[in-house]
């Protein structure tokens, strides 16, 4: 046991540093995508108009039909921002990891975050029902792409480090 502990590498590998940098960038993009890059529809009319007035102005302003005050795309944007923060934190934790033996487990966690980013706008919360809004043709595909990138980054950690210490996997 002493020999195994002495042979462990106590600094992050180049791959882990590269994946951490990509996770930081991707997490920031996930946070900014639904708010600034492809902003979701207005959740409420800034002029304080009633729902009937807003539904009449759909042709002049892309405002989705509201039934309960806020739309699905607004909730999706908030939840995706939370997952973006979690992905950024995962990248920071990955940078501070000193043992290669736990990188595979962190890869599984990162894969779960990436799958969650994909499932939120597609299945769990969803987006607007109106097909012509930027929520559906901009925000949703961008979040699916970013979530897929995060999933692939986590998968690459699992593949690379799953057999790092085979004596512990028995």
Image (cartoon, rainbow, N blue to C red):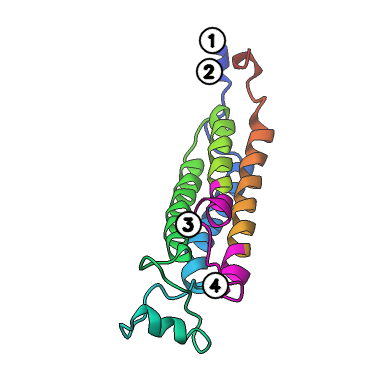
Please tell me whether mark 4 sits on a helix, a strand or a loop. loop
Q: Residues within 10 Å of mark 3 (few under 14, many from 20)?
A: many
Of residue 116 and residue 157, the one placed in the foreground of this image is: 116
- Mark 2 and mark 1 in contact? Answer it, CB < 8 Å: yes
User: Residue 81: which quarter of the image?
Assistant: bottom left
- 157 lies left or right of 55: right
- Quarter of the image with the C terminus in it: top right
Residue at the spot of label 1: 1
Q: Residue at x 53, y 18 (%)?
A: 5
- Which mark lies nearer to you, 2 or 4? 4
Please tell me whether mark 3 sits on a helix, a strand or a loop. helix
- 43 lies left or right of 121: left
Q: Position of residue 6 (x, y in %)?
A: 54, 18
Q: Earlier in the sequence, mark 4 or mark 3?
A: 4
Q: Earlier in the sequence, mark 2 or mark 4?
A: 2
Q: Earlier in the sequence, mark 3 or mark 2?
A: 2
Vertical order, 103 against 6 (above or below) = below
Residues at marks 2 and 1, CA–CA distance in whole angstroms: 6 Å
- Mark 4 and mark 3 in contact? Answer it, CB < 8 Å: no
Q: Position of residue 135 (x, y in %)?
A: 55, 70
Q: Residue at x 51, y 89 (%)?
A: 60
Q: Which mark is residue 38?
A: 4
Span colored in magenta: 116-140
Vertical order, 16 against 10 (above or below) = below
Vertical order, 30 against 10 (above or below) = below
Residue at the spot of label 3: 80
Instruction: Look at the image and say whether residue 138 sits in the magenta stretch.
Output: yes
Q: Main secondary structure of the magenta part?
A: helix
- Which mark lies nearer to you, 3 or 2? 3
Q: Residue furthest left?
A: 48
- Mark 3 and mark 1 in contact? Answer it, CB < 8 Å: no
């Amino acid at each position: 046991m002493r020999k195994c502990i002495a042979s462990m590498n106590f600094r992050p590998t180049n791959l882990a540093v590269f994946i951490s940098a990509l996770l930081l960038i991707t997490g920031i993009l996930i946070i900014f995508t639904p708010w600034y890059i492809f902003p979701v529809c207005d959740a409420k009319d800034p002029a304080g108009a009633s729902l009937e007035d807003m539904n009449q102005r759909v042709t002049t302003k892309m405002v989705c039909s509201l039934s309960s005050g806020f739309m699905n795309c607004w909730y999706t944007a908030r939840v995706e921002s939370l997952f973006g923060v979690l992905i950024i934190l995962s990248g920071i934790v990955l940078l501070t990891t000193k043992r290669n033996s736990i990188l595979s487990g962190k890869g599984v966690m990162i894969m779960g975050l990436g799958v969650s980013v994909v499932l939120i706008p597609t299945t769990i919360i969803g987006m607007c029902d109106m097909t012509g809004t930027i929520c559906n043709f901009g925000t949703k595909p961008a979040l699916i792409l970013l979530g897929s990138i995060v999933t692939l980054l986590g998968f690459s950690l699992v593949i690379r480090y799953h057999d790092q210490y085979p004596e512990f996997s028995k």
